[in-house]
Image (cartoon, grey):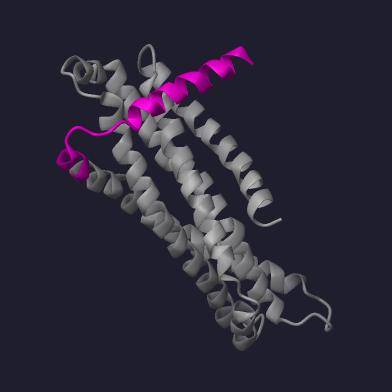
Amino acid sequence: MFETLKHIGAYGMLMKRVLSKPERWKIYKVRIIDEMDKLGVSSLGLVILLSIFMGAVICLQTATNIDSPLIPMTLVGYATRESVILELAPTMLSLILAGKVGSSIASELGSMRVTEQIDALDIMGVNSASYLILPKLVSALVFFPFLIIISMVLGIFGGYIVSVGTGILETQDYIDGIHLDFKLYHVFYAMVKTLFFAAIITTVSAYYGYTVKGGSLEVGKNSTKGVVSSSILILVFNYLLTQIMLI
């Protein structure tokens, strides 16, 4: 318990430094663009592949488990849309990005810490926490929602591919199900979750990387801790946000 409180306090102090006003905005703008490429664009291929297959599997499983003539097949499209928008796109992909992006951030900052590059920035009078972490945070907050929107579209499209390719249900039934009782608020809810998850992934992973003590072995350990902690917090905030926004 004491160790947890210690980490929470250290994390809060680090975030205070991270969110302090940047001294030179031009440098930060360049770094934000670079981080968007490293954290967001590089994850696009993975997001596309996972989204299509997630939507396809949900559609296939739903269709094969409807064995009553009283249940309309439009339910398949409806269930696929709701599953993708509410949970699969924002939550499942965020958990996967926590492993890919989070481990990358933690290992990068951890390597800089053990090779004393961060100490060198501090000696030169640079706010190393803000300079290294803030661009990652901003780029994630800006780019991750686009990834999730792409995931939503491709997840629903993956279900459409199954309906057309396998003939397990009429394509028009799937399309009608997609349009059935659509609520734009659900997309807004997913975007809010995505912003929380993006902040968790970047800041928690950065904290574990920035505070590494030791050598390369500790970098690997802290990288793992960052991914695990981010994943747990994503699940906790997923429940809390659902409780607050949907119930």
Residue furthest to the front: 21
Magenta stretch contains residue 12: yes
How many labels were placed on the picture? 0
> What residue is drawn where x is 52% and y is 66%?
155
Relative horizontal placement of residue 229, taking residue 124 as reference (left or right)? right
Magenta stretch contains residue 223: no
Depth check: 44 or 117 in front? Answer: 117
Q: Overall secondary structure of the magenta stretch?
A: helix
Q: Which quarter of the figure has residue 77?
A: bottom right
Relative horizontal placement of residue 38, taking residue 96 as reference (left or right)? left
Image spot of residue 157 (x, y percent): 51, 73
Image spot of residue 213 (x, y percent): 39, 13
Task: Note whether residue 18 is visible.
Answer: yes
Indicate whether 76 appears above or below 211. Answer: below
> What residue is drawn where x is 56% and y is 51%?
91
Indicate whether 27 appears above or below 245. Answer: above
Indicate whether 243 appears above or below 153. Answer: above
The span picked out in magenta is: 1-29
Indicate whether 18 appears above or below 150. Answer: above
Quadrant showing the C terminus: bottom right
> What residue is drawn where x is 46% and y is 19%?
10
> What residue is drawn where x is 25% and y is 24%?
127
Task: Note whether residue 89 is visible.
Answer: no
Quadrant showing the N terminus: top right
Image spot of residue 12 (x, y percent): 46, 25
Depth check: 87 or 108 in front? Answer: 87
Image spot of residue 135 (x, y percent): 29, 40
